[in-house]
Image (cartoon, rainbow, N blue to C red):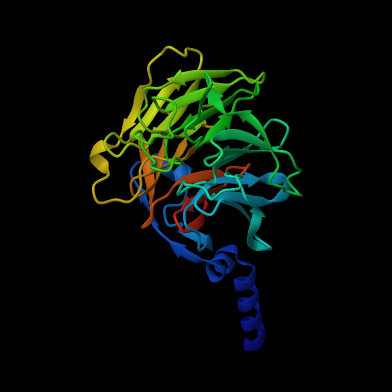
Amino acid sequence: MKPVFLLLILILSLLINPAYTQEAKYKTTGNVERIDPALDAIMDTTVKAEIIAEGFVWSEGPLWVENEQMLLFSDVPKNTVYKWTEEGGTEVYLRPSGYTGTQPSKSKEPGSNGLLLDTGGNLVLCQHGNRQMVRMEAPLTKPEPVFHSLADNYKGKRFNSPNDAVYSSNGDLFFTDPPYGLPMQNDKDPAKEIGFNGVYKVRPNGEVVLLTGNITRPNGIALFPGETKLLVACSDRDAPGWYLLDINDAQKEPVVFYDATDQRKGLKGSPDGLKIDKKGNIYASGPGGIWIFDKAGKVLGKIRLDESASNVALSDDEKTLYVTNDMYVLRVRLR
């Protein structure tokens, strides 16, 4: 075979090789730390996180929408939801997303935080600025900042700033309510009406049920397969970790799933957003990047990142992990 044909074959093979095209298109960051051999079934330990979008103030709440092949995510300080697609890159999707008042917001983080789809495929947002859980009253393909409130108070007192949420298959909505969207972002804020930071359930009829007020800074939230237990992140700098919560017993105290108090020194980030796959494996933002647990709480590995990670999303086939990473949005290939 002539050298010219060999060269053409080499060029074509490089162009159709996904690893080559991805590396050429996106910068990468971070590295994978393998702590337990079980990680090998989840991801290749040589994989790098691709920076698919950047330039944000604080990216949050990623949501993969399979039907539209798009990733939605919040920039909380910018009061904006962005859309990313492989073909079109990044564009504004929805603004305002969390605070819709006519006067300037006093909050440093007035926008939406967590994003999710309800059982009807509608976009649901955790609104910091408006201090409520809402459903967008517009199609996903034609977004507009018109919202229907799903819950905005507990026993007549306004929520702090709903942060993250998850739906069960029967339509119950579970969400966390720390103070990060308030002007002072702490429990001493005069705007704070509830004397604790709660984890709540909203039934399909709109009834709000307090599950616990005993997690100091409830943040990320996800349901385990079987939908009997919630995993809730606690982003309290003095008590960072993750808690188990029995959703069938509102009086039962949260149980420590993993305590990260002694593992955050010198690392950026705290336990924040998380997702659980169909096998019960957990992908959780935490000190130093993304922590990967099995369902029993064993740390299998970590995706080490230089900047604070806030939240994650899984593609429907669970072969891709999306990470909001401060000013970046990342993509990590899974097995």
At horizontal 46% and vertical 57% (from top left) the residue drawn is 47
User: Does residue 297 appear anywhere in the picture?
Assistant: no
Image side of residue 115 versus residue 245, left or right = right
Question: Compared with residue 104, is residue 222 higher up or lower down, i.e. above or below?
Answer: above
Outermost residue on the front side: it is 103
Image side of residue 259 versus residue 70, left or right = left
Residue 224 in the image: x percent, y percent?
51, 27
90 or 96, nearer to the observer: 96
- Residue 192, image quadrant: top left
93 or 98, nearer to the observer: 98
Residue 258 in the image: x percent, y percent?
33, 31
At horizontal 42% and vertical 52% (from top left) the residue drawn is 45
User: Does residue 127 appear anywhere in the picture?
Assistant: yes
Question: Compared with residue 313, is residue 278 higher up or lower down, i.e. above or below?
Answer: above
Question: Compared with residue 246, is residue 163 higher up or lower down, i.e. above or below?
Answer: below
At horizontal 50% and vertical 30% (from top left) the residue drawn is 159
Q: How many marks?
A: 0
113 or 21, nearer to the observer: 113
At horizontal 54% and vertical 22% (from top left) the residue drawn is 201
Work out which quarter of the rendered image holds the N terminus and state it.
Answer: bottom right
Residue 76 in the image: x percent, y percent?
51, 49
